[in-house]
Image (spheres, rainbow, N blue to C red):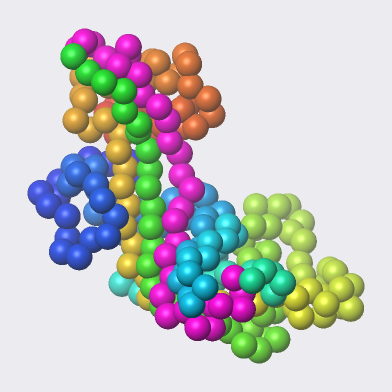
Amino acid sequence: MAQQSTSSSPPTGDKLFSAPHFRQPDRAQALQWLRLYPFATLITTATSGLRATSLPFVVEKDDPDDIQLLGHIAARNAHAAELSSATKALIVGNSPSAYISPRWYAQSANVPTWNYVGLQLRGPITVLPTEVDRRTVLERTINEFERSAAAPWRLSDAPQDLVARLLGGIVAFRIGPCRLECVEKLGQNKPGADADGTMAGLRAEGDEMGHAIARLMQQMFMPAN
């Protein structure tokens, strides 16, 4: 998924800070990060101030020009009561990141940094008011995360009285069309021996996230033919 951007400057109006050479300009590619790491943070503002809740998102439409997301939140969460008055939402994705030690560089005149993937989506949020809506969102969510199973579990497998109670205890919503911005800071400015040393250091000393960053760097610097 990682690739070196050829963009000379960020598009007008970008909200997510990054140097141009770290930006992922392909929105379809960037959206794959939400599919890989669908548990993200929903942030909205209301009269009480900022609200933030971590929850899973499902991509309803993946048209780069009309990205639509679905989600649901527990009705007992105070955030849920404020969604109807929110006009816009920010979704902050959770993606790989890793500390980069200057010990790993071939050049000694360096300082520590952090390599990471950052994903943000912004768009209008709409509460889906009916029980049919809530059931549809639950079914879409379950089907998305059960899709790799040999015998997927379905909402219809649950006792219907339990489903009815569940539907009464959630608030479903749609966000979109979304503006998507993605940063893939993977040492594009440190090629050659510095990149080789960084990948070796991450493999030797890094945790699971560090190993993921090393794999992304390898895909970028040494793509398979």
In the image, what residue occupies the spot 75% across and 76% down?
169
Q: Quadrant of the C terminus?
A: top left
Compared with residue 112, is residue 77 higher up or lower down, i.e. above or below?
A: below
**Residue at the left extreme, as displayed:** 8
Q: Is residue 179 visible?
A: yes
Q: Quadrant of residue 202?
A: top left
**Relative to the observer, which residue lies in front, 55 or 68?**
55
* Part of the protein shown in magenta: 79-108
Compared with residue 9, is residue 214 higher up or lower down, i.e. above or below?
A: above
Compared with residue 115, is residue 86 higher up or lower down, i.e. above or below?
A: below
Residue 31 position, x and y percent, is 40, 57
In the image, what residue occupies the spot 31% across and 72% down?
65
Q: Is residue 176 visible?
A: no
Left or right? Give the position of 127 relative to 18.
right
In the image, what residue occupies the spot 52% across and 50% down?
37
Compared with residue 222, is residue 46 higher up or lower down, i.e. above or below?
A: below
